[in-house]
Each structure stands twice: as structure tokens, then as C-alpha cells.
Amino acid sequence: MAEIKTEAPPSYDSEDLEQNVPDTNPQNDSRYVTSRASPYNVMPIEMDCPHCQNHIVSHIERVAGVLPWIIFGICAFLGLFLFIIPWCFCCVPFFLEQILDVNHSCPACKKFLGRFSRV
Ligand SMILES: [Zn+2]
């Protein structure tokens, strides 16, 4: 009744499968992993627009993301209890380019392309 199939010669098959794994991985995946995030940066990038297919240089717009609000909260908190930070300083993060997010849009079709986020 019981057929023992443990002594299976197809061990070669499994080895072949393992060897084939790296070959079947598309290169796009590895590039995506190494970049770790969106390809968008604080600077305009040259790319093909996925909406209008034009070769464009992205138009950037700085917007307040999460980070300014965090700094705003810390400043407000410290100012409330320590009175060493003027509360008007809390608005400064929203004007610092270094901590603002950057939205990329297509100059041709005005479509939103992507966002560079600080957090
Ligand atoms: Zn476009």
C-alpha cells in the first residue's frame, strides 16, 4: 500500500529551479529595490511622461509634507512649556526648502507624476 517516494531522483530538478530563479527576476525589480523609494528627487528629473508620452523635464513644486508639522508640533510644545522659542518660529519649517516635500508634475499635460517625501 504505502509507496515510499522519498528516494526521488528529481533532486536535479530542484537544483535547476534554484538556478533559474535569479534569471527569471526582471531587472526592474532589482533596480526598484536598490533605489528604495520613488525615483523623484528635490531636483527636476528628465523622464518620459506616462500620461502624454512626451519626453519632459518634470516641473517641481514644494509643498509642506509631514515633517514641517512634526517640527511645528515640537516647537509649539517647547514654546508652551519653556517660553524660549517664540511661537512665530513655529512657522519657519514651512518655508525651509530642505524639509519640504517636492511634487513633480508634467509641464506638458499638467498631470501629477510623483512626490519626493522627506519622511
Ligand atoms: Zn505629460
Image: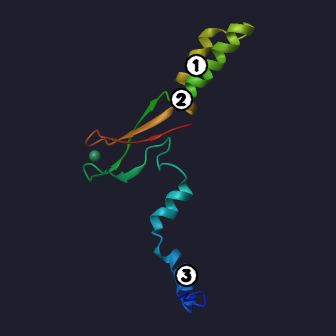
Disc 3 residue type (three-letter): Gln
Report the residue at 50% width, 34% height from top: 101
Report the residue at 55% width, 83% height from top: 14
Q: With 119 as the anchor, is 56 left or right in this view?
A: left
Q: With 114 as the anchor, is 13 left or right in this view?
A: right
The residue tagged 1 is: 92
Q: What element carries label 1?
A: helix
- Pair 3/1: label in front: 3
Q: With 34 as the anchor, is 85 left or right in this view?
A: right
Position of residue 14 relative to residue 49, above or below, is below
The residue tagged 3 is: 19
Neighbours of disc 2 within 10 Å: few (<14), some (14-19), many (20+): some
Cβ atoms under marks 3 and 2 closer than 8 Å: no
Position of residue 63 relative to residue 27, above or below, is above
The residue tagged 2 is: 66
- Residue 8: percent from left, percent from top: 57, 90
Disc 2 residue type (three-letter): Val
Report the residue at 40% width, 51% height from top: 46
- Residue 38: percent from left, percent from top: 48, 48
Neighbours of disc 3 within 10 Å: few (<14), some (14-19), many (20+): few
- Residue 19: percent from left, percent from top: 55, 81
For the residues labelled 3 and 2, the Cα–Cα distance comes to 44 Å
Q: Earlier in the sequence, mark 3 or mark 1?
A: 3
Neighbours of disc 1 within 10 Å: few (<14), some (14-19), many (20+): few
